[in-house]
Amino acid sequence: MRWSQLHIPTLRQDPAGADAVSHRLLLRGGYIRQLMAGHYCLLPLAIRVRAKIIDIIREEMAAAGAQEFLLPTMQPAELWRKSGRWDLIGAEMFRLRDRKDADIALGMTHEEIFTDLAQELRSYRELPQTWYQIQTKFRDEPRVKSGLMRVREFTMKDAYSFDLDAAGLDTSFQRQHDAYHRIFARLGIPAIAVQASSGIMGGSDSVEFMCPTDAGEDIVVHCDCGYAANVEKATSRLEPTQDSEAELAEFDTPDARTIEELARLHGKPAQRQIKTLVYVADDQPVLVLMRGDHALVEQKLIDTLGAADLRPALPGEIVELLGASPGSLGAVGVKHLPVIADEALRGRKDMSTGANRDGVHYSGVDVCRDILIGQWADLREVLAGEPCSLCGQPLRTTKTVEIGHIFKLGTRYTETLGVTVLGPDGERVKPIMGCYGIGVERALAAVVESHHDDAGIVWPLAIAPFHVAIAQLGDAPEVAEAAGALYQALLAQRIEVILDDRSERPGVKFSDIELVGIPFRITVSARGIAAGTVEVTTRATRSTDHLPIADAAAHLVALVNAA
Amino acid sequence: MRWSQLHIPTLRQDPAGADAVSHRLLLRGGYIRQLMAGHYCLLPLAIRVRAKIIDIIREEMAAAGAQEFLLPTMQPAELWRKSGRWDLIGAEMFRLRDRKDADIALGMTHEEIFTDLAQELRSYRELPQTWYQIQTKFRDEPRVKSGLMRVREFTMKDAYSFDLDAAGLDTSFQRQHDAYHRIFARLGIPAIAVQASSGIMGGSDSVEFMCPTDAGEDIVVHCDCGYAANVEKATSRLEPTQDSEAELAEFDTPDARTIEELARLHGKPAQRQIKTLVYVADDQPVLVLMRGDHALVEQKLIDTLGAADLRPALPGEIVELLGASPGSLGAVGVKHLPVIADEALRGRKDMSTGANRDGVHYSGVDVCRDILIGQWADLREVLAGEPCSLCGQPLRTTKTVEIGHIFKLGTRYTETLGVTVLGPDGERVKPIMGCYGIGVERALAAVVESHHDDAGIVWPLAIAPFHVAIAQLGDAPEVAEAAGALYQALLAQRIEVILDDRSERPGVKFSDIELVGIPFRITVSARGIAAGTVEVTTRATRSTDHLPIADAAAHLVALVNAA
């Protein structure tokens, strides 16, 4: 392609409001333009990269035995009502009505529809099946941000497996797991596979693939020993504690309304306090107890309770439930509300907590003796430096963005949608499902987050929009002729090459080629031709070699094919 | 691929309600399943065909110098308001509101968004540009039908050109026109290019590409001389007429309320009558005059008036406007309403028409003398057998479905959205646009409409889901071994081959392979192996050759590569 004929609107300046590196560089490089918040136009360079990402995904899906489908974006509300998710999912799902006033969902995921198609599977002999599509998904994100990383409309590869039993699901799940590793390796994304929460998908087990980036909002907790989990799921080893026996006693705390004040003014260290939180889960109030120095991870609470909706109780609700305001809350003697406590409180004695009278606390609390705990659970946020639950070494935390997520779904969808196949012993069996997603444009952005420098993007060769850029400097006929001959020679060898034939200064061409991120640049200049040479510059290292003109094409072919 | 592992749910019986051949065969062949009216799931075989169609479209777009983009499906109402189409387009556009209550259109076409992107074009030196995408479109069709042919959600290749002037547009338009011919030729669709109405796209000129099929609803009028037009646009040569002078006179017609009754009871042949129709165009009433034996084409009236909305007047409105009911309507002496007359009435004398009093008609009407005609226009429906306006030979009519449509748009969108570039003389110039669309799944269905027989689909090799099917008959080890060896040999030669390794009867395999439409079948049987041969059957001719096993792979490779 000739640069002069392509629409590559590069920008000299950093655009306002683009915080994430990938957002900034994709805008500046002329890859994307925003139509409205959360909706981006992909320009020709982005299309080339995206097509290569999709090709890699397709190859690995085929290698994993998955078959490609394409399902409608518009889905009848009826199927979502059957699965129970029409009401379960809130404003995140775009909905509309057609001219006949029928309720329609815009697909944010396709469990219901693929499961409906699975009605046609008749016998266990047809299992396993893994079906996927590459398709536009819609999610009405409350906070779009970071360019392509958090949007309302995006391309997704979503796959769904159907197996006869849990062992079959394990195999299908592992095949997708392995395919994901290969996909991210081929894309050049240093993905970390972590245990994760299954959220609204339900199911027993899920693994997220995370790309480290400062623009990410997900914290991954990991250890050199191999342990890795999303902070929504991560645990750490609790240090052993030794508590003395103590008697329950009240003390006045008119001046202490926070963990920190109780520690400072009354000598009760945070790790010896019980923090009492009041939540409303699916319209039911619940008390949540944490150690004073621990933070609650709300997703863990959601997963523990199996709640569709969770919110902190309002101040008025708290007074009505407990007779006191935050600052003096506690669960001692509470029998009219369910109490769920973090594992770090199990067996603890001589603790302090609020007495449900403003300005009064208890000391000497024995958690098991004095509080009616309905449920124990791991609810606390793991912090960097805590000991790994596997090996005891200090854990590290990293900011990441999710680029893939795979789930074991179980029979939730085949059950609610009534799908069965004939089993080996003549009984009807509900196939057991898994689902597996990758966001295509987010993966593209993640590559940029992982591969850039001060000058711009540094695409891995496998997904670069072009392998080689020829910078044709000046308008001397011998330069145009030599550049054109190189261009044709590379095309003939199936090298993807772009000829920068614009009437621009050398500096503009160099900075555009670096910004856009083409792996190799050949510079053709009058001075070089006089000396019989061209320059070959490698984007990643920014190192330049001088080569005889006659050798340049073969050298580039070797470089591209070796990579 | 092995048939036993693919999801190809063929059906023995014709499904109920599938009238069009393509609908019936794509359902029976396990290519598609309906999710809800107008929304189809594409199954693995359909995905393979669709991908090949898209590849052909991409190759021809690239050859025509078009650059690929991908734009959002969701579009802000604001841009459609600027272009004037938010209100102009009715229920056909799906609309919704997001969580912030913003109006959003689901893209049924993308003139507004591509034009908005063209804001970044700065100079005439960047023109011409032709931009396209392959993307899901949504249209809330009032009557979905015929499987993939008329749906609410489909993949479209839509391209948009930007040129400095009309001569540039002519060139861009012609390049797309030529690309469309090549695309349809490669797909095996016998497309007819016809003059067409531009409808809601606006603009001066448009060409439709039509595929003949009994399932089509568009009538194409064409002639051996090369003339071809959609009936919405077609004309024919008017036979010369010789009318006598006559005086205007009333006569009573209490028994004649139709053209036919006036002819039969009062001796006024239909071709000597004036038919008076009352329409409401954009809320304004208008009288439309046709010769008694001619039918109005409403699209011609819409195009002539430039109306966004057209409907027949209601009986009550007619009485209020003209003082009479249908059956005795006429335009003689009417001055308070605009009158538009078909060209076939120009200069006619001694005609009959209603007198705007129930049961009374006029005879001896001289159209120019007695009626205040505001506008003459070609409004009549051309019928088969009328003389071609170019050569005079009898015209023919064919039922077709539209598979592509290209338009000269002019500056409507660059004007309303305020897009200009710097012109050669330093003035700002509004680029002049064209747009060019192909429906991908409709093209797929059109291929089936054009290529099938009683046994099923007969795919052209270029887009067949597989080139070769190997029917492995019986479960003898030597059969499985020979079939497997052939399968591997063909794969190694990059032949797309499916091995039917199911434990099904030979008849089931043969009929499935024919139904699905694989161009070549190799039959491997125990008897054949005993004789050292396999059978090779060509789907299109259903002819079979016996070949030595050792020659089979090379023979198939030659067959596939020769096609």
Image: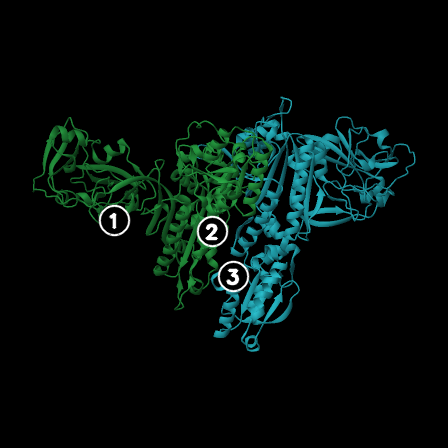
Chain colours: A green, B cyan
Residue A456 in percent (x, y) is at 43, 34
Mark with earlier residue (1, 2): 2
Query: Do the residues at discs 1 and 2 belong to one chain?
Result: yes
Report the Cα–Cα distance between label 1 and label 2: 33 Å
As measured in the structure, the alpha-carbon distance from the residue carrying label 3 to the one carrying label 2 is 20 Å
For label 2, the crowd category at 10 Å Cα-Cα, with few meaning under 14, some 14 to 19 and many 20 or more, is many
| Closer to viewer: mark 3 or mark 2 | 3
Name the quadrant of the N terminus of chain A.
Answer: top right
Q: Is residue A350 left or right of residue B83?
A: left
In this orientation, which residue lies closer to the viewer: A548 or B309?
A548
- Both marks 1 and 3 on one chain: no
Q: Which mark is residue A225?
A: 1
Q: Chain of mark 2?
A: A
Residue ID at (65%, 22%): B425
Q: Pointer 3: what residue?
A: B492
**Where residue A58 is drawn, which disc sits there?**
2
